[in-house]
Amino acid sequence: MLRRVLLIVGLLIVAGALGFWLITMPKKLPASVLAAGYQPDLANGETMFNAGNCSGCHITQGQADRTQLAGGLKLKSPFGTFVAPNISPDPKAGIGAWSELEFLNAVKRGTGRRGEHLYPAFPYASYALMKTSDVRDLFAYMKTLPSSAAPSPPHELSFPFNIRLVVGGWKFLYFKPQEFVADPRRSAVWNRGAYLAEGPAHCAECHTPRNALGGPELDKLYVGAPNLEAGGRFAGNITAHPKDGIGDWSVEDIAGLLSTGMDRCFNEPTGMAGVLAATTKLSAEDNTALATYIHTIPAKPGNGKHKTC
């Protein structure tokens, strides 16, 4: 009788483990997403590069040139320290030997070149909203940037966070990939801003608080995040709340900050320095679109003591 019970328990454990693997295994895009006859638009790729602030994490440490992407930035978190990798075109140390499909899988599915889960410190939950053509343009543009042979240091994570299989569970709970769908009730400018903010610019990734598992608290979208990085800066409330947020800002105020790097009180927000270094390279039209969308984010109370100017 005991042997039968143990056998049943063993089978249930195996079945559970197999079920968990099948549910959480890394997902990939089919090769059919690569439409034939595609011609990369390098100018659009550069726009996506700046909108996504790729340099913000992957810039070579100590290097002012934001096209040098040897990585090395350490992002401390409750789960350990994530180290931004080399994403320069170097074929060994960087992504120079990656195929276009491998790059798409990393950006839009959080699946690495070897079929492994990527940690969501890389904001693929937002990047999944990007159009495939935009990601292809981004890849083509990145291949034109300087190459670096600097190796990527490993992440500094403790058990169980150093087990990438665990990320599959996180994806099951929080990662629902789909491309952006325009709202036909809104203007083209608003939809462009929504696409940029929710997709490549991944604004919610910093401005939304996270729970103990690192998942976004969706009922608190954009109300501000006190722990962007362990011991790091605070991302303010950017909803339309008049006291805690930026409800007293105009579209022009927001666009001015994104375009010049200086807020309406003529301050240079230190917490957004890296982001603003990227948005100041965007076109006036894109920054106006971003501002138009951000200006309509529903008002929610957040953290008034951290209110932006």
Image: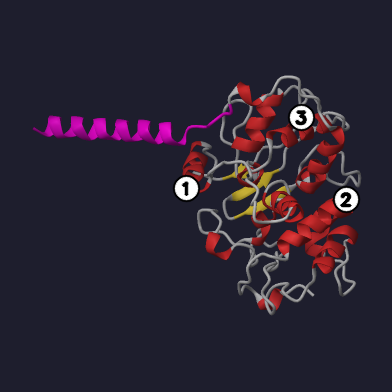
For the residues labelled 3 and 1, the Cα–Cα distance comes to 30 Å
For marks 2 and 1 on the same chain, the one whose residue lies earlier in the sequence: 1
Element type at marker 3?
loop
User: What kind of secondary structure does the magenta stretch mostly adopt?
Assistant: helix
- Amino acid at dot 3: Gly
Q: Which residue is mark 3?
A: 94
Which residue sits at x=63%, y=37%? 108
Rendered view: 112 above or below 299: above
State which quarter of the image contains the N terminus.
top left
Left or right: 32, with 4 as reference point: right
Rendered view: 279 above or below 159: below
Q: Position of residue 300 (x, y in %)?
A: 61, 72
Q: Which residue is mark 2?
A: 283
Q: Position of residue 231 (x, y in %)?
A: 68, 62
For the residues labelled 2 and 1, the Cα–Cα distance comes to 36 Å
Q: Which residues are magenta?
A: 1-29
Q: Position of residue 148 (x, y in %)?
A: 84, 31
For the residues labelled 2 and 3, the Cα–Cα distance comes to 29 Å
State which quarter of the image contains the C terminus.
bottom right
Element type at marker 2?
loop
Which is more toward the observer, 234 or 250?
A: 250
Image quadrant of residue 230?
A: bottom right
Label 2–label 1 contact, CB within 8 A: no
Q: Which mark is residue 173?
A: 1
The label nearer to you, 2 versus 1, is 2
Element type at marker 1?
helix
Is residue 6 covered in magenta? yes
